[in-house]
Image: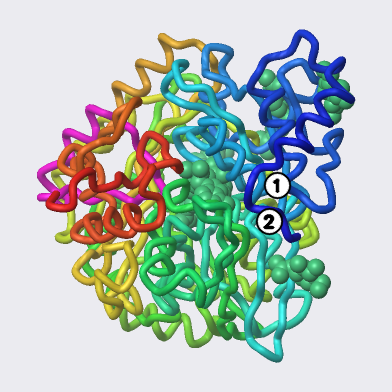
Amino acid sequence: MSPSTGSSFSLSIAIILLSTQVWADSDSIERKFYYCVNPHTIPPVPFSKTFFTPRNASFTSILNSTAQNLRYLAPSEPKPKLIFTPLEESHVQAAVICGKELGIQLRIRSGGHDYEGMSFTSVTESVPFILLDLANLRSINVSIEQNNAWVQVGATIGEVYYRISQKSQCHGFPAGLCTSVGVGGHITGGGYGPMMRKYGLAVDNVVDARIVDAKGRILDRKSMGEDLFWAIRGGGGGSFGVLLAWKLRLVPVPTIVTVFTVPKTLEQGATKLLYRWQQVAENLDEDLFIRVLIRAVNVNSTTNQLGQRTIRTSYQGLFLGRSDRLLQVMKRGFPELGLSQKDCKEMSWIESVLYIAQYPSSLRPEFLIQGKSYFNRSYFKAKSDYVTEPIPEQVLEGIWERFLKEDSPLTIWNPYGGMMSRILESATPFPHRKGRKIMIQWVTLWESEDQDRANKHIDWIRELYDFVAPYVSKSPREAYANYKDLDLGINDVEGDTSLKKASIWGSKYFKNNFKRLALVKTKYDPDNYFRHEQSIPTLRVLSE
Ligand SMILES: Cc1cc2nc3c(=O)[nH]c(=O)nc-3n(C[C@H](O)[C@H](O)[C@H](O)COP(=O)(O)OP(=O)(O)OC[C@H]3O[C@@H](n4cnc5c(N)ncnc54)[C@H](O)[C@@H]3O)c2cc1C
Ligand SMILES: *[C@@H]1O[C@H](CO)[C@@H](O)[C@H](O)[C@H]1NC(C)=O
Ligand SMILES: *[C@@H]1O[C@H](CO)[C@@H](O)[C@H](O)[C@H]1NC(C)=O
Ligand SMILES: *[C@@H]1O[C@H](CO)[C@@H](O)[C@H](O)[C@H]1NC(C)=O
Ligand SMILES: *[C@@H]1O[C@H](CO)[C@@H](O)[C@H](O)[C@H]1NC(C)=O
Ligand SMILES: *[C@@H]1O[C@H](CO)[C@@H](O)[C@H](O)[C@H]1NC(C)=O
């Protein structure tokens, strides 16, 4: 755990002489990295468990293991020269020191859920990279007495929820709905979920962190200082260093919560109801979160000879309380949904995690510590929007028209209000706070590797995105950094990208916080070592 900071050439040479045989015909990046890493770690790296070259049989399965968007596993996608899977924090330090010394880029991966696959591939073949896969760093220590948890980045958020629930029935943590996202990338990009109206985002409930900076030092909140600690709570992954762990503040949850799902099709008045929901959602009781999942479905799956389709909107709710109080809240705030006692299911908070993730009711919470998603992975393209005024019914109809023409379209509408409106835009880099009524995610999914098919789906979602432009946030059109969308713009492959150019995408994710992020970046990583397609740029000249 105490690596030396300088390089140790004499030791490297000794090792080269001993084991040069292994590398006789191998690539020089592997070789150089291997000899650099070794003297930097005490105890030494067990290479047979951490070092995978493209010639190792398990290379592809490790690369594949957590990649969520299958588009980025295609054979044409740039592959790492090497996969390094640290077992100790000191291995991460060595990877940063050596990667930088050798001028090799690192791609950092925790849970692999990056929408554009940028944690394990790249838009260009021209810059070789090493994949630093942190999946083995996944310990979780929950302390109910201190009301917090230290969590390593390679854990999934579902594992965190499970470990908390094993210690207490009345504690939880407000982060994502999808249980397989990695704590590393997810929290540093914001992290919203069904308790956001009550407690805010995951980043709003982080109290400390451990990070390896560009000099290979391990810093915590005290040693990194408040500006870097601010930047990593929402500024997105892969810009400031390699996060090792987060310290999370637990939040209270009732021992019994209530969940429900109420579907409405077009035939059942879905359009009018969705308009109404947009008007009321942000003002509902803060204990209540109702999101709407919208798909194109067959009118009747048993008699679908005509292939007739409709739109199904599903109102999925989590209420931090019992059903009797929920029914009163709904009667006052959103009677139009017609929620009744028979729609309501009471359960523990950890069971609600599985319910909201849409897992089958037969699945037990223990499933969460397998670190997997129940659903098969697919090929997808997604985009996000923030809504400040309800989208008119006529425009909703235009969206339905487009949905009915697409194979597997999905859009998820998340309510705002509550705690989200009380946190200042500048409190964290995540700026989408007061005044937003809804966050929308647009998705299209498909099952085939075929590039022409993929292009058709991508064209479809771009056209939809253009269509809704007049009805969502403007100047800038805001987007969620955790729903990475390279259509918004990317950095230059070589050299530094100007703040002006990067602001095209950066202001959408971070608004006025973008410049401050660039200042922090310049201070902590002036050489711009930690970089990717949408990493925070350094300021080239101080006057910029
Ligand atoms: C199916 C699915 C469901 C989702 N549901 C939600 C949701 O409910 N709520 C929500 O807010 N988001 C959700 N997301 C988005 C998710 O939060 C982001 O994709 C997030 O970045 C994933 O983190 P990861 O560690 O799994 O990803 P990775 O692909 O490992 O990393 C994402 C980015 O962070 C960087 N990074 C990863 N680890 C580190 C580290 N340790 N240090 C520094 N940089 C790092 C990577 O280089 C990359 O740039 C979902 C995504 C998917 C695919
Ligand atoms: C990977 O391959 C190298 C030789 O190509 C071998 O020495 C090493 O043991 C292999 N590692 C693993 C983890 O299989
Ligand atoms: C990747 O993993 C999935 C799930 O385990 C598997 O179905 C698929 O065949 C793998 N693909 C490759 C390219 O290894
Ligand atoms: C959890 O505690 C163990 C034992 O003290 C320690 O080795 C580990 O590093 C801790 N994990 C985190 C994330 O703090
Ligand atoms: C679908 O059609 C079958 C057979 O006509 C009918 O029994 C069933 O109720 C229909 N389902 C729905 C959801 O309309
Ligand atoms: C995943 O895919 C397999 C093979 O196509 C299928 O049998 C299985 O039902 C799928 N699982 C889910 C949850 O969709």
Mark pair 1, 2: CA separation? 7 Å
Q: In this picture, is 418 found above or below 301?
A: below
- Quarter of the view holding residue 322: bottom right
Residue 2, given in percent of the width and then of the height, sits at 73, 60
Residue at image coords 17%, 33%: 466
User: Looking at the rendering, in which quadrant would you find the N terminus?
Assistant: bottom right
Q: Of the numbered discs in the image, which one, if any, rests on residue 155?
A: 2
- Kindly tell me whether residue 162 is visible in this rendering: no
Residue at image coords 23%, 64%: 436
- Kindly tell me whether residue 43 is visible in this rendering: yes
Residue 320, given in percent of the width and then of the height, sits at 52, 80
SS at mark 1 in the image: loop
Q: Which residues are magenta?
A: 462-486
Asked if the stretch drawn in magenta spans residue 107, the answer is no
Asked if the stretch drawn in magenta spans residue 465, the answer is yes
- Quarter of the view holding residue 284: bottom left
- Quarter of the view holding residue 395: top left
Between 112 and 414, the one nearer to me in the picture: 112
Q: In this picture, is 341 found above or below 381?
A: below
Instruction: Say whether residue 178 is left or right of residue 226.
Output: right
Q: Which residue is mark 1?
A: 135
The quarter of the rendering in which ligand 6 is drawn is top right
Residue 486, given in percent of the width and then of the height, sits at 33, 33
